[in-house]
Each structure stands twice: as C-alpha cells, then as structure tokens.
Amino acid sequence: MFRTATCGELRLADADKQVTLAGWVQKVRNLGAMIFIDLRDRYGITQITVDEHAAAEVKAVAESLGREYVVQVTGWVAERSAKNPKMETGEVEILAEAIRVLNVSEVPPFTIEENSDGGDDLRMKYRYLDLRRAPLQRAMMLRHRLAQQVRRYLDEKGFMEIETPYLIKSTPEGARDFVVPSRMNLGEFYALPQSPQTFKQLLMVSGYDRYFQIVRCFRDEDLRADRQPEFTQVDCEMAFVEREDVLEVFEGMMRTMFAQTLGVTFESDRFPRMSWTEAMERYGSDKPDIRFGMEFNDMTAWVKGHDFVVFDGAEYVGGICVPGCASYTRKQLDGLTEFVKRPQVGAKGLVYVRREADGSYKSSVDKFYAQEDLAAWGERVGMQPGDLLLILAGAKKQTLAALCALRLEMGDRLGLRPHDTFAPLWVVDFPLLEWDDETQRYYAMHHPFTSPKTEDMEKFFSGDMRALGDVRAEAYDFVVNGVEVGGGSIRIHDGEVQSRMFEVLGFTPEEAQAQFGFLLGAFKYGAPPHGGIAFGFDRMCSLFGGSDSIRDFIAFPKNNSGRDMMIDAPSPLAASQLDELQIAVAKPEA
C-alpha cells in the first residue's frame, strides 16, 4: 500500500507505531543537523523529521525535496518535543527511515497555503492547485456533507431520487437557454434544462408522488457572486399536497441541516411567514434580511405641502431610522449620498434628519420644515436621541429598491449582518404575473406552471387585464439572511387552468401546443394536485460556509464572463465540426 495512515489522523496514542504516509510537500526546513518536512494530504498535515541518526540516503532525498513534490514516507510515530497546538497532529512527528519521491513538481505559481498570494484569475487558471488549499478542501467537504444530509432526510421522508434528461426542448420564458446542435437531426437543437420543471410534473402524473434530484441546471444569464451559468439545485416535487404540506417537509429539512452542520437550532415552532406585499412595503425586497430592524416608514402623506419640490413631486417618500448614527459627519453623510446615487442603487439624492442628544432635530431640509415637523416625523418612526433618519423619494418601485440597498449598506456598516447568525423566513403569496410596459404584456413572475390562488381564480379567468395584476400565486420562497435559498409553488394540474395561463402569457393555442403539448396531453390522463420546491444547492453551501460567493463551493467554476480560465472555454469549434453540423458562424461586426 502507498500509505497506512493519512496526514491528518495520527495522535499521541499512535506513538511507537511504524506508519507509511503519502502526500505533497508543504514546506521543507533544513536546519543542517535536522530536516523538517510538512507533509500534506486532504486530511491534514504531519511533520516528518529527518534527524542526525537517519541514513545518508534518507538525508539526501530530504535535501532534494521541493514544494509540492509527491512523496511516500515510512517511519515511526514519536512525541514531539516542541508541540504545535495549532495543528491537529501537532503532538507527534514521524521519524523518517525511508523517503521515496513519487513525483516531482515545478514551483507552483502561488503559495498553496491557508491564505494564498495568488489573485483570483491566477487561482482560477490553476484551479487544480487551488483545490489543494485547506479552505477549498473544507468547502468541498462541506458540500459533500450537505448533499449526504439532503439525501438521508428526503429518503427517510419517502422521496425517490430520479434523474431527468439534460438534452431537452427549448421553451420560452425564464432565462436564455444554452442550446446544443443535433448531428442526427440537422438544423434542430436541444436545450440544456434551466430546471427539471416539466419533467418533475410529469413524474407526478406518473404516480411517483415524492421525487427529488440533486441536479445540474443551466441558464445563459449575466453572472455575479451568487450566480453561475451551470449550477446545482435540490429539486423536489410532491403530489396530493397543499402549500403547508410542502413548507412543513422542507422547513424540517432545513432545520435538520442547520442542526447537523452548524449545531444551530431555532426557538420558534415554525419559521415566520410574510406575504410578498408586506415584504416589499417593509423592506423593499422579496428576500428581506430580518436579522435587524430599520424597516421602511412610508412618509409620503406626512411631508407634502411645504414647497420642497423633491417631496411634493414624489410618488413615494420613505425613510429608515438608523440607531446610534447621529454622530455621522458631513463627509460620511456625503458618502451615503454618493452611495444612493450609484447607478445600481438609482436614487437622485438623500435627505437626513438627526436627533441630537438634547432631543432637538437637525436636518438637511431645515429650510422647508420646522422643528415641530421634524419632531412629528421622529415620533412616528420612533427616533431616539442619537438616531439618524435617512429619507429617499421618487417613483415608488425604484425608491423601495434604493431604500433596500441603503438599509443593507447601513446593516453592514453597523455589523448587523454577521455570517454566524441566521434568520429564516418564508415569503408567500407572490403576484402570479408581472406587467412589462415595453412589450405591453404579462410575464409569469415565477414560471408558467405556477397555480393561481383558489380565491383569485375568478379574477384569473376574467377578461379584465387590470384584475390579472391582482392575482396572487400559490408561490413561496425560502429566504435566509437576505438570500433566496429556495423557491417553489403549488403547480397547475388542471388543463383548462394551464391553457388559460398560456393565453394570458400571449401564446396562441397552436404555440402552446407546439411548446408544451406533451404537458397538456399528460394533464388529460389524471394529473394529481402537486407542488414542489427547488433549493439553490451552491447558495446553500455558501450560506453554511459563511461566504457571499458560491465559487469556492464549486470545484470548477466559471468567472464573471462565463469563462473557464483553466481549460479556456468556451472556444471556437473546428471547421470540420461546424460543417458536419451544417452551422455557419457569422463574423462579429467591427
């Protein structure tokens, strides 16, 4: 055998045992009379000692070693005279009696240590080296453990893991598809699935009433820290259920994962629920971080009629009360103004009201509002001495979004959003549809298979276009710390309702049949009531791992341009491949 133990398992109880280890050389310290080698594998690091009594050939090999050489060491476990409490194996060392070089290594382009000196692009290019580092190995191990916990929990609840196809039909709605040309059907294309949505519904029609899959999904969309072109979902579906049945099962799954992974339990019997409307009014987001306050105050009716045109002409005026920030300097307030003016925030400016220690008020709009006006605002929003009221105004939708960004920024500045506290939340009762002014049509807020709420069916089938905007969906999102971790809905299982949905979304009967005829056909053969949910597994990993980025929890991720820096993909195809597929590539315009 190449090894009888790993580099992370030996302890003082193993003293006087002869062992063989194999791994990578982390570092070599040659002190002349003695040589110390830190030998690393994915389980840990063990110190190898070549002392003055070692054989000459052992000393010669030890002196030749460089970083990342792959070696095999045989020796005796001994208690270290100078113990290292920072290492799990820090009480022992291996007195080497044989060292064999299994492979040599060039000097790596960055240090393979806890904190590397390599930049993001460099480490992405040499990802196979980056994955040797302990932080990445911990991330991969966390991902593995979470996947096993998901499988165990769902298996115990009677779910079957069933695979669905990766080569499917391209369908409209949602993000852009990645498409795959078919050599055997020239001129036709597969699409990679954005999710297994229609297939898991067909499995419900097929009688597999509890399905799950830890599955790859593909979306051709703009990227950011928590988004990749290919990502993993915990995809689940249940038949003969209502919304509360789904929420109960998957709240149980998340409680189990928090407890088993982080030792975190929650006092409440169930996670809080909040309607989409309430979330937007209170936090300006359908995925609010509820670990801290600073909820929105609708000030629109309080502030009009004082000749301040910014407020008088605004559709919505909203403010957040920030505790303990009255000492903010003019420079800091100017910095906040610049923050809200950023294009990604979108506000035109910022108004502040400060409550001084003596109870008086100071404001950037003192010219228009008297002390009693400011005091009335302060009383309504609950300002205490030392608090700061930050106010934005404009169109309601944009102002709510800007206030949300400002609230999260202040939460970060005040240290109210640590990675080791968790506030789960179910957001429910989303709108079924959203109107797009540019195309003058409705789009599905989630997807075309989400069921309207039963009590809104009359509006859904009415011919009143405005009434359609008030129809609520049996949809729900699982949110933790301001991140949407999972989302799902009760599905449409009635062919008439599904046909109406396609009609509302602008499909002709012929288009609906061409795109989704297989699903409409299946509904004719006894589709049960069903619903489900999908959790973003990469986001789940980053949540439990205490990171804002999902990349460290994906073995081989893409960068922000959707490129794999390591294998240099995407890349052009050979002319012979294109000819075989009968595909011509147009040259980009100059």
Image (cartoon, rainbow, N blue to C red):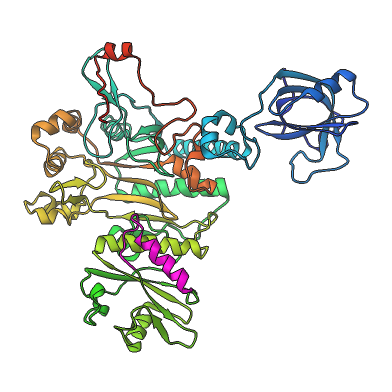
What residue is rendered at 66% in x and 24% in y? 106
In-front residue for pair 188/432: 188
Up/down of 74 relative to 123, above or below: above
Q: Is residue 203 left or right of residue 538?
A: left
Up/down of 340 relative to 523, above or below: below
Q: Which quarter shows the C terminus?
A: top left
Residue 530 position within the rendered picture, expressed as x and y whole percent measured from the top left = 28, 41
Residue 228 can be seen in this image: yes
Residue 136 sits inside the magenta stretch: no
Residue 163 position within the rendered picture, expressed as x and y whole percent measured from the top left = 37, 27
What residue is rendered at 50% in x and 60% in y? 267
In-front residue for pair 436/194: 436
Q: Is residue 32 left or right of residue 173?
A: right
What residue is rendered at 42% in x and 79% in y? 354
| Extreme-right residue of the structure | 53
Magenta-highlighted residues: 329-349
Residue 330 sits inside the magenta stretch: yes
